[in-house]
Image: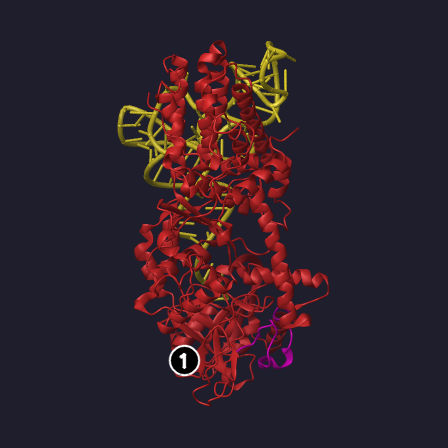
Amino acid sequence: MQNNLDKFTQEKIYQTWEEKGYFKAHPGSSKKPYSLLMPPPNLTGEPHMGHAMQHAILDALARFKRMQGFDVLLLPGVDHASIQFEGVFNKILAKEGLSKQKLGYDTWMKRAWQFKDEVYKSFHKTWSLMGISADWSKEIFTLDKKVAEAVLEEFKIFWEQDLLYKGAYIVQWCPKCGTAIEDVEMEYVEKKEKLYYVKYQIKESAEKEQLEDITIATARPETIFADTAIAVYPNHPKYKKYVGKKAWNPLSSKENALLLPIIEDKRVQKDFGTGALKITPGHDLLDYEIGKDHNLPILHAIDKNGRMTNLTDTLEGMRAEEARNKTVELLQEKGVIEKVEDYTHSVPVCERCKTIVEPLISEEWFVKMKPLAQKALKHLDEINFIPKNYRKIIANWYKEIHDWSISRSLWWGHRIPVWYCEKCNTNHEVGKDKDMIISLEKPTTPCKTCKQNSWVQEEQILDTWFSSGLWPLATLGWPFVAKAPQGKPLTSQKGFEDNMGKYYPWNFELTAPEIKYLWIARMIMLGLWFKDQIPFKNMFFHGTLRDLQGRKMSKSLGNGVDPLDLINQWGVDPVRMTLYSYAAPGRDPKASKQTMDERCKSFRNFGTKLKNIYRFIIDLNPTNSSLQKLSKSPPGSWPDNDLACPEEQSDERNSFKVDTFKNPSLSESFQISHPDDKKIIEDLNKTIKSVTKNLEEFKLHLATEELYEFIWHKFADVYIEKSKTRRVETQPILEYVLTNSLILLHPFMPFLTEELYQKLPRCEKSITLAPWPKELKF
RNA sequence: AGUCCAGUAGCUCAGUGGUUAGAGCAUCUGGUUUACACCCAGAGGGUCGGGGGUUCAAAUCCCUCCUGGAUUACCA
């Protein structure tokens, strides 16, 4: 068992590519641009198979476009991933018996940045190991100054356009993470609970003397303390007569929750439960909406730590789950529980820590999204979604969009760039007439009311996606190289090179479907809003790798496959080929270590085949081929007098191979007259055409399959076998087909093709500079 | 509940109007030892989830049902 290339050779090849600057984009070049945006992996640990797949796909396309003669920009970066990073990092600290609180802000931050550096190193190692041909000189981290400036600009524009507001609203709160989260950051789990039917006594019964009551069904009796109304469906036959009256809260002794008005609202479903609904605006989204429309007060029975408040007297400080049982006991004592039913429903939990999410009121920042979504909807057709059905999925989300809650009570991220005057704005109120300033640094200008410099910054940070949503812009130097909307003057000019004009919109972006709303939909909205153009022309969704049972690969399930293990075992090129074979757009491929090993093995064998083809044609060349004389450099050695940069190369560099064969004076032995020769050249032509087409359409799984079939079964098994009887005569054709095969295969198996290409009698300085093959007319 | 995706060889998957439905792995038979045993030639293995329809022609398009999965919404 031996791999085709040893680690050392691979490293050397990669180093040379980098040193020669083959991966650099050249904004000044006259070549047509082709830009690919690397999704920044989250700063949370080792790269996983999903990353490996994304990067392998991006790299193949980048290499292909470069060989086609484009000025390619493949721009890398890493995302700080606030909430995920804190989750991972705090767990590590916990192992040392440390925590955020124990370390304090400054020390914690220092340690966090150290951890960031460690993770960064492991990313870089993997990238170079995989042969990723990115322009490292342009690499960005989402907490870089440059991005912070862009985020400031984003914030300011939203503020000036009156799209930004701050206030106490109901949000999804994760008591464990201690922050508000977005609904897209939640998931649902089925839970078996009870549905309690509770009687609320009507204050003034109808004419009759006996007391009447209204029964409501609830799964969360512990929130009864914070009820502020009872709602029924309009014109409900049974309850119509109670509307306008009041009911006693069975638990509360607090004045504003003591008597509950009975109201009508069509958002109540008449067929569920009893058709009457208790309204708890402080702990339920729908209730909050209803409460707002009916001007109901908002009360809190549960606080941000998930514990009962003083609204509950005896239960204060108790965890909500525990309090439920206690509440039921209280209700039983009062004899107001009519019946209890089993009830299964989905409960929202935090996607990160699986804690039950508590809707509650919190002071947060929001962006109004309607206008942005509407604009995005208008332009959605300008983006080529792969697969196509994602257009519809994204469009549906835009149609039902709600405001974006952008503040998070965390430390790792962009601090909200708002400063309040400590003296005049103690409540940290927000508004154009309030004493506040938007700025990254502490303002130097005094407060206009008290004339003092006592500014304090907003404590919260911004949602990660507030910055990653700018990724297509910030990576190219926005806002310093592009005008903000409404012809507004630029904040500053900081000498950024103007990549924007050349590379925006990006030609290609890809991602996993999981973050289509969080990231992709937002990049589209922000790109259109700030730049008036879609951020990318082709949006590719690859599938999520799953295990054989169809479950997501994850650390906790232990069903994941480490890309580095595979690479160590089989070499990079076979692993890349394996990933392409799984890269059919929009499909979720199922795999295990074993199935991946099988594929890797077959592609490793393919590499060996290629080496043997090379050996047969070149090393065992029976002729002193006339082509040999044209050699630019002796086989097997790396040319040392390279051009500084590929830019300076003339286009003629590529023409000699085909011309050689067309021109009898250069190759007297090259005659395509034998049927076998015709057949193989025709097959190669077909392969060139079809591989090119499939790459243009991002069908990498088909392109690799065709090359595999052509090289192994058509070229090696058939043509080479037949050629043995007329070996000398076929030598030029063998060399021609081999050269073109290597070039076609290079985007997918960069290392082995480079290694073999270097040893061909005539070649470029590197296969990365070789022109993409064209069909040979004869 | 809505929407979307999938169901093809023992397994993992390509193929999405047009020869006899393919690949890798697995199974079986034979061959080759100076390009390659990490090989070559060949074989077996499929009512393309079920049913109905459109068409000269359907795995492919339409309808319907079944199964699995994603996703969205509600859930008092």
Rendered location of residue A284, percent (x, y) = 49, 70
Image coords of residue A94 (percent x, y) = 69, 63
- Picture quarter with the C terminus of chain A: top left
The magenta stretch spans residue A301: yes
Taking the magenta stretch, the answer to whether it contains residue A291 is no
The region drawn magenta spans A300-322
A592 left or right of A778 in image: right
Identified at 41% across, 32% down, the residue is: A691
- The residue that appears at 52% across and 14% down in the rendered structure is A622
Which quadrant, please, contains the N terminus of chain A? top right
| Residue depicted at 63% across the width and 66% down the height | A110
Q: Which chain is yellow?
A: B
* Disc 1 residue crowd, few under 14, some 14–19, many 20+, Cα 10 Å: some
Q: Is residue A311 visible?
A: yes
Q: Position of residue A608 (x, y in %)?
A: 58, 26
Q: What residue is disc 1 on?
A: A431
Supply the letter of whichever chain is red.
Answer: A
> Is residue A213 among what the camera can see?
no
User: Which secondary structure dominates the residues rendered in magenta?
Assistant: loop
Query: What is the three-letter code of the residue carrying label 1?
Result: Gly
Q: Nearer the viewer, residue A748 or A725?
A: A725
